[in-house]
């Protein structure tokens, strides 16, 4: 072999080596699911925060994720996300626990203690603590082959939007009011007819007369343009509510490298922080959007709020007893939740705990 030929071959080999990556990347397919469309913040921050955070955490690790985003009913309907996880149709999901009071009763403790704190961050912090200190909270997820990733989302201070003015609970007599899952309980004793519903159908339900109003929170009511069909806004201070969390398919998660598991948990933490920050920033603008006419905005007087809380049956006690009867730590969760929030300065309007 001539010296020139040897040189050419060596140069070609070197160029080939330089063109090859230093390490091979293993790509992992992950489908992330939620039944709501991206117009809602808890879906929006899957794309804007969770995915970029996980990707950044995996840089240089030898692993990458090939994401498939399945939102707005494309893979699972609202409330069907947990089934998608259990069936292995998705690896990661934001599960709206509010629509799963039977499957996940413990995660619905906030909806059974209305008129609580208006601060979503306070509610999220306490719920995360409960998940990490009361085994039954985590075991609830394990039943459905789901692993709690931490964080999630809480909804801002719930209020009432109606097609008629409401100045007191007396104005609700005989009216059909839509509410999310367990929040239907907030209407018991008021004379209203509570009907379970969700954000994806509220507008049409009011427009067609199925409902005459809904219990909703401002940052979702504004993009849904509910004021067009329900122009009367009553600030009831039902409180912020824990409404969902991030989970992974537990069987799939156990097979993933530690670096991937840690990246997903870091993504869940970043997701929650970003969600709460944008939600807080949006509340004022959302209130202005849903109540453009000050004449249609009514803040329930403190004594009327106390009256509403007083006429409700013992929602929390019944919920806790039912959970206890299922072999779940309902009373433990209830007392821990209420005590932690009262210690943090919350005022429930009535003591929901079971002593």
Image (tube, rainbow, N blue to C red):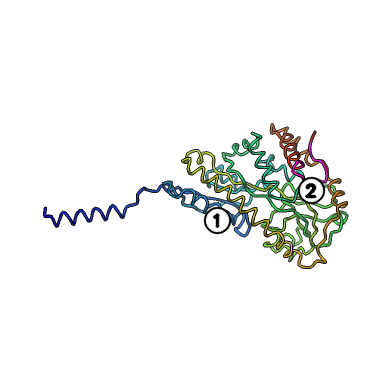
Residue under pointer 1: 47
Q: Please name whichever residue, 45 or 201, is drawn nearer the observer in this view of the structure.
A: 45
Decide: is 333 above or below 282. Answer: above
**Overall secondary structure of the magenta section:** loop
Query: Picture coordinates of residue 331 (x, y %)?
Result: 74, 34
Secondary structure under the numbered disc 1 in the rendered image: helix
Q: Please name whichever residue, 219 or 122, is drawn nearer the observer in this view of the structure.
A: 122
263 is within the stretch colored magenta: no
Q: Which residue is drawn at the image coordinates 26% and 56% (left, top)?
A: 15
| Category of crowding for the residue at label 1, using alpha-carbon neighbours closer than 10 angstroms: few (below 14), some (14–19), many (at least 20) | some
347 is within the stretch colored magenta: yes
* Mark 2 to mark 1 CA distance (whole Å): 32 Å
Magenta highlight range = 342-353
Query: Picture coordinates of residue 115 (x, y %)?
Result: 79, 48
Secondary structure under the numbered disc 2 in the rendered image: loop
Residue 81 shows up from this direction: yes
Query: Picture coordinates of residue 234 (x, y %)?
Result: 80, 58
Decide: is 327 above or below 67. Answer: above
In the visual, does 90 lie left or right of 137? left
Residue 207 shows up from this direction: no
| Category of crowding for the residue at label 2, using alpha-carbon neighbours closer than 10 angstroms: few (below 14), some (14–19), many (at least 20) | many
């Amino acid at each position: 072999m001539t010296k020139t030929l040897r040189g050419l071959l060596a140069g070609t080999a070197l160029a080939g080596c330089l063109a090859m990556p230093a390490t091979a990347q293993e790509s992992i397919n992950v489908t992330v699911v939620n039944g709501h469309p991206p117009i809602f913040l808890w879906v929006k921050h899957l794309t804007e925060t969770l995915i970029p955070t996980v990707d950044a955490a995996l840089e240089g690790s030898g692993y990458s994720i090939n994401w498939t985003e399945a939102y707005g009913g494309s893979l699972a309907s609202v409330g069907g996300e947990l089934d998608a996880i259990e069936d292995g149709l998705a690896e990661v999901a934001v599960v709206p626990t509010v629509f799963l009071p039977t499957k996940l009763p413990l995660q619905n403790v906030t909806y059974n203690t209305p008129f609580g704190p208006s601060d979503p961050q306070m509610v999220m912090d306490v719920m995360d603590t409960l998940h990490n200190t009361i085994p039954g909270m985590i075991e609830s997820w394990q039943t459905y082959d789901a692993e709690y990733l931490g964080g999630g989302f809480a909804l801002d201070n719930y209020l009432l939007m109606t097609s008629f003015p409401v100045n007191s609970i007396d104005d609700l007599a005989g009216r059909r009011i839509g509410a999310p899952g367990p929040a239907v309980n907030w209407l018991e004793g008021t004379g209203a007819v509570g009907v379970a519903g969700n954000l994806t159908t509220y507008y049409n339900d009011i427009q067609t007369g199925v409902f005459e109003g809904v219990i909703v929170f401002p940052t979702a009511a504004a993009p849904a343009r509910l004021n067009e069909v329900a122009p009367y806004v009553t600030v009831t201070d039902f409180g912020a509510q824990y409404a969902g969390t991030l989970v992974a398919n537990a069987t799939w998660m156990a097979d993933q490298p530690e670096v991937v598991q840690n990246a997903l948990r870091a993504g869940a933490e970043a997701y929650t922080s970003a969600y709460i920050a944008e939600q807080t920033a949006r509340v004022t603008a959302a209130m202005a959007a849903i109540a453009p006419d000050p004449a249609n905005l009514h803040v329930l007087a403190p004594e009327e709020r106390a009256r509403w809380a007083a006429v409700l049956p013992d929602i929390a006690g019944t919920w806790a007893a039912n959970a206890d009867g299922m072999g779940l730590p309902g009373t433990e969760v209830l007392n821990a939740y209420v005590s932690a929030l009262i210690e943090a300065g919350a005022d429930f309007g009535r003591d929901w705990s079971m002593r």
